[in-house]
Amino acid sequence: MSLLEVTDLRVSFPTADGVVQAVRGVSFSVERGQTLGIVGESGSGKTVLTQTLLGLTPGGQISGSAMFEGKNLVGLSPRAMQRIRGKEISVIFQDPLTSLHPLYKVGWQICEMIRSHDKSVTKKQAIERAVELLGHVGIPRPRERVNDYPHQFSGGMRQRAMIAMAISLSPKLIIADEPTTALDATVQAQILELLLRLQQESDTALLMITHDLGVVADIADNVLVMYAGRAAEKASKRDIFYQPHHPYTKGLLESIPHSSASNDRLKPITGQPPSLITLPPGCAFHPRCAYVMDRCLVEQPNLIPVADAGEHKSACFLPTAAVGLTEEAEDLRKQTVEMGRHAQAVKVAEAIAAAPESEGSVIA
Ligand code: SF4
């Protein structure tokens, strides 16, 4: 049985302008110890989807199910959800300051998290655990820094502190919502390395939400690509990078920023995601799709297996192999997969650290 099994999840919000259909029938599963990357542009529904799993969509009309260890998270009372949040499912947000209170010491906040779920832990034990956790996530001199306030930490250190808080109760699932988007490339790489290491050490499952396919290149086992509230493509990371089928996935691959790419080689997807109140008929991607056919204008494609590849599914009417990558995109894809953009950034950071100061920057 999967750790998390989401089936036909739908979330909408009635507003004065109409109903926002944020999530429109999404299904996926997350296995123990594995990472699922959920990828899509802003407005694809990925964040609403994960907030729904955490019971953080007040006012949302929700249907479908999200079975976590035999419990349906959809329709769980706020109290029951509070018991699960932090202890069994924890979350790391893009901006640690949304989770770290500026007026309380970092260590105190980690202690509160630990003691709120286990009153038998004494304050002394909790502070020792906070010191241990801060050291484990790479905060230097944790016994001193445990008494710092969030503003005394750099952006990368705050994100590490958030991760310490997220793992403090040994959750079975961590949801990381754009955890590295606000960070520069080198710190981003270090945070992804840290998440990967912690996940491998503890066999925790990870749900990684991102707009950047490059982020999932190093870290994910499987990938779900979302567009306009629906799943556009679902496959192993290898299939997503080596045999993308949906034109939207192809567009995301072509727009991966890369350290060796000049700006003119990046190809952003043309057009904008549709309004989730007035969705286009047929395939929601059709106004932006270079392969659009007559039936795409009237028929909505379902997620079906690509040829015989059972686990690789795509919601597109195109036959297999119809969607090729441009030469430049193919080149970037290879570099991203084979070397890993983040692994590459770590290498650069290590080279900078190792270089004598008089040599200056090693970045050409
Ligand atoms: Fe493009 Fe049609 Fe496929 Fe939609 S179904 S992605 S419009 S080819």
Image: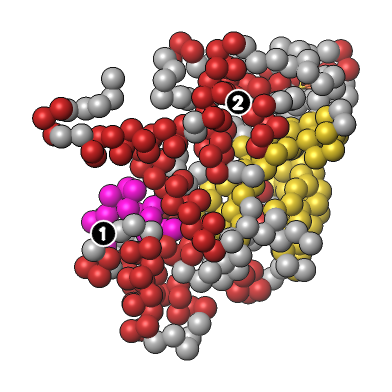
Left or right relative to 166: residue 346: left
Q: Where, by quadrant of the figure, is residue 270 drawn?
A: top right
What's drawn in magenta, residue-wise? Answer: 147-163
Q: Mark 1 points at which residue?
A: 140
Structural crowding at the residue carrying mark 2, measured as other residues with C-alpha within 10 Å and reported as few (<14), some (14–19) or many (≥20)? many
| Residue 251 on image: x %, y % | 63, 21
The percent position of residue 180, horizontal first and vertical second, equals: 44, 43
Asked if disc 2 is less than 8 Å from ligand 1, the answer is no
The answer to whether residue 43 of the structure is visible from this angle is no
Residue 135 in the magenta stretch? The answer is no
Principal secondary structure, stretch drawn in magenta: helix
In depth, the one of 219 and 174 nearer the eye is: 219
Report if residue 304 is visible in the image.
yes
Total number of numbered labels? 2
Frontmost of labels 2 and 1 is 1
Q: Quadrant of residue 161?
A: bottom left
Q: Position of residue 308 (x, y in %)?
A: 87, 31
Q: Magenta segment: does it hold 158?
A: yes
In the rendered structure, the answer to whether residue 263 lies left or right of residue 255 reads left
Kind of residue at disc 1: Pro
- Asked if disc 2 and disc 1 are in contact, CB closer than 8 Å, the reply is no
* Relative height, residue 342 to residue 131 (above, below): above
Q: Is mark 1 on a helix, strand or loop?
A: loop
